[in-house]
Amino acid sequence: MPKNTKLRDRGRALAKNHKIALAGVAALGAATLAFSAVPSGGQTTTIDAAASASPVTYSSERVKDVRASVTDQLAVASVKVEAIEAKKKAAAEAAAKKKAAAAEAAAAKRAAAAEAAAAKRAAAERKAELVRQAKEAASRSAQRVQVQQVAAKATYANNLDGWIRQSLDIMKSKGIPGSYNGLHRNIMRESSGNPNAINNWDINAVNGVPSKGLLQVIPPTFKAYHVPGTSWNIYDPVANITAAANYAADKYGSIDNVFGAY
């Protein structure tokens, strides 16, 4: 066979094989499309035996990071739960602190109110006490004025009995204790009822301050215990008696307690 004839026959054979290969590829593609279009619950029918005979290729590579991915997801979920719990805990602590601060503020407010109320009560009580004292002082003053007026209006005999009775009225108005008997007893012992009596022999006379008057009072004692409203004359019977009774009340509690030299 000539050489050119062989070349033409070889070319025809290659072209024919190429067409067959292309037809096989097209048939395989059509079979694949037909299989994919069948519903999941439907039945499949093999149209081309070539499609069922085609080899199925599986990947030889192992599935990686599946477990790691799940672990990561769990870790993220755990972090989120912890964050939520921490947020709740912080909110609860903040609420507790706020409640404690409110309670403390309320307690401080109550304490301040109680102190203010106590101070107000104390001020009111002090004011009431001052008012009471002022009323009592006014009452005592009025009583003294009344007693003085009565004493001024009263008529006393100009003798020992009259002097003692006038002295007792003045002493009563001044709150000086003493009785008629106590005054009379001491007057009789000291001067025998002589308003001008003077002692020129005892130690007081030796010291230059002799005792004088009904109750034998020395001048410094008469001056220190002089009763307002009476004469400054030490020989005045009423002035002498009231000054001596005032001195005896200070030293002995009352002229009634004096039974000797005093």
Image (cartoon, rainbow, N blue to C red):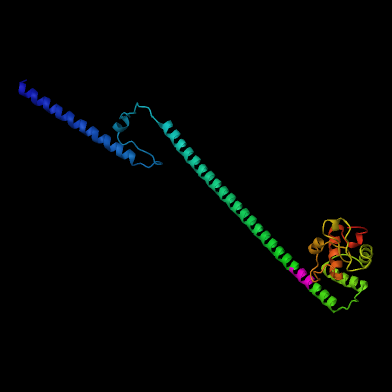
Nearer to the camera, 236 or 67: 236
Image x and y of residue 118, in percent: 68, 59
Q: Is residue 135 magenta?
A: yes
Q: Report the residue at 47% width, 38% height from top.
A: 79
Image x and y of residue 200, in percent: 88, 60
Which quarter of the rendering shows the N terminus?
Answer: top left
How many discs mark residues in the rendered view?
0
Image x and y of residue 176, in percent: 85, 65
Q: Is residue 126 magenta?
A: no
In the image, residue 255 sits, relative to residue 152, either above or below, namely: above
Nearer to the camera, 199 or 91: 199
Image x and y of residue 245, in percent: 86, 64
Q: Give the range drawn in magenta.
A: 134-141
Does residue 1 appear left or right of residue 256 in this picture? Answer: left
Q: Report the residue at 81% width, 61% height from top.
A: 221
Q: Quarter-wise, where is residue 55 in the image?
A: top left
